[in-house]
Amino acid sequence: MKAQPTASHFIDGTWVEDAAGRAFDVVFPATGEVIARLHEATPAVIDRALAAAERAQRDWARLRPVERGRVLRRAADLIRARNADLSVLEVLDTGKPIQETEVADWPSGADALEYFAGLAPTVTGETVPLGADFAYSIREPLGVCVGIGAWNYPSQIACWKAAPALAMGNAMVFKPSEVTPLGALQLAAILTEAGAPPGLFNVVQGFGGVGAALVSDPRTAKVSLTGSVPTGRKVYAAAAEGIRHVTMELGGKSPLIVFEDADIDSAVGAAMLGNFYSSGQICSNGTRVFVHRAVKARFLEALKVRAEAIRLGDPLDPGTQMGPLVSAAQVAKVRAHVDLALREGARLVTGGAGEGMFVPPTVFAEVTDAMTLSREEVFGPVMAVLDFDDEAEVIARANATEYGLAAGVFTADLARAHRVVAQLQAGTCWINAYNLTPVESSFGGVKASGVGRENGRAAIEHYTQLKSVYVGMGPVDAPY
Ligand code: NAD
């Protein structure tokens, strides 16, 4: 599969180019090689995409849900059949290692298409008995939905938004991150091949301005954004102007709490997965690892040995466990955090600044709640280990953040696990596990980490609206 797509955009069932749009390069982060050159969507391209979506949505919504589901199922099958090629493209776009993209990126996208394909026919309304009269409810699609993606899981994000939106009878215009624009175009082509009508799922490229134009267009009924909190604030505000529905999947600074009775090997493994997978560029990462003082030495010792054994290198090599970060800008941001943590007095256990586009797995210990490393999202392979002594204290400290995306608890005492989870302010929690996000279970944040949910049955509510129908069965009894 060539990295350079046939054209920059995919609209109304076909590839679309408009060279009048600002050109931008797509770079393979591992080598700096320019692998594709695209053009940002012009106002004419944006208009064409929204018009096509509006047209396609009307007929699509009239199909039986089982027919809509069939298209999504076929798309899931095509993705699985082509996973090897698609996963290479994902490596080129993101720099993530092939051993990850082959199992995590497109496969989880295919899962979402398959799951919502099956769920679509199960979505029904209710009948409300009212004596002689009755009412019933219908779950209707919203119309044209706009999806805006982040760069860390570009193809998964596109699928996670497209699958519930289309299954429920909506159409979508999707704008990928300008940093990783390639995967979503493949999804559009695959959906079309699977039988999606022209215009049902459109991809337009560009920077924030293109996203902003989509969000404020009167044809847009809903916006689903995956991105940072500052962007979330802007998009949420712009959507509010038109009273549009929103789903906001934003950032986090999630706590992972390791109690003294935890299986330390599992806790170390989870902390590594929750800080180093995808070079740490995952929104739900457990970047504040609270370790009970009684097991801290054991935890850090095992962690250091295992972190230092991680193989960094060419992400296309199947033996590589960690690739580069996604962009030079992200490398600079992560290195600035490493410098600041050192200056603020955190103890470097392993790792550090790294070289070129690579930052090694990095662990800081003796991190305090006041340090920047405990408060700001780094979005790189930098783990902060904090000490704690008791349960009430660690819960209060875990919650002392504006974020609330995720949280994890490691303990052998299941009563404690449930008691602690009940008090954690986070939309997604794990007990003796971390960062597993199967499509069957809903995912999303509380507080500044977002509103709405992706995945699971909960996603249905965020791509439909309820219509209540009152049925009068007798004469109208008016007092006039
Ligand atoms: P970002 O906020 O910089 O950009 C996200 C998307 O929004 C991009 O496509 C960008 O072009 C677009 N955008 C920017 N300004 C806009 C505007 N004014 N109007 C409309 N669209 C606009 O985020 P990023 O750097 O691409 O991704 C990293 C962030 O995403 C991190 O904060 C991470 O935590 C978060 N994230 C969250 C989840 C989740 O599910 N909660 C998943 C992945 C990433």
Image: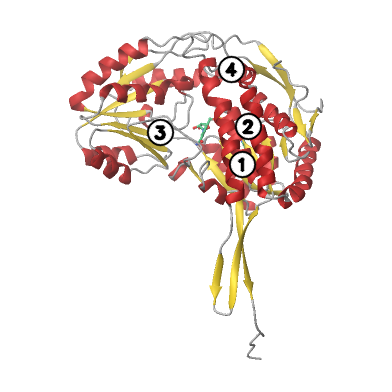
| Of the two numbered discs 3 and 1 in the rendering, the one whose residue sits closer to the viewer | 1
Q: Residue tagged by mark 3?
A: 253
Q: Quadrant of residue 178?
A: top right
Ligand 1 position by quadrant? top right
Decide: few, some or many residues near mark 4? Use Cα within 10 Å; few <14, some 14-19, many ≥20.
many
| Of the two numbered discs 3 and 2 in the rendering, the one whose residue sits closer to the viewer | 2
Viewed as shown, does residue 120 lie left or right of 55? left
- Residue under the point 38% across and 16% down: 362
- Residue under the point 49% across and 25% down: 281
Between the C-alphas of marks 2 and 4, the distance is: 20 Å
Q: Residue tagged by mark 2?
A: 76
Which secondary structure, mark 4? helix
Between the C-alphas of marks 3 and 4, the distance is: 26 Å
Decide: few, some or many residues near mark 1? Use Cα within 10 Å; few <14, some 14-19, many ≥20.
many
Residue 128 percent coordinates (x, y): 55, 69
Residue 349's place in the image compared with 116, above or below, is above
What type is the residue that disc 2 sits on?
A: Ala
The residue closer to the viewer here, 49 or 261, is 261
Query: Does any atom of ligand 1 lie closer than 8 Å to the CB of label 1?
Result: no
Which mark is first along the chain, 2 or 3?
2
Residue 177 percent coordinates (x, y): 62, 29
| Of the two numbered discs 3 and 4 in the rendering, the one whose residue sits closer to the viewer | 4
Which mark is first along the chain, 1 or 3?
1
What type is the residue that disc 3 sits on?
A: Lys
The residue closer to the viewer here, 235 or 157, is 157
What type is the residue that disc 1 sits on?
A: Ala
Viewed as shown, does residue 412 lie left or right of 122? left
Residue 65 percent coordinates (x, y): 66, 48
Which secondary structure, mark 2? helix
Decide: few, some or many residues near mark 3? Use Cα within 10 Å; few <14, some 14-19, many ≥20.
many
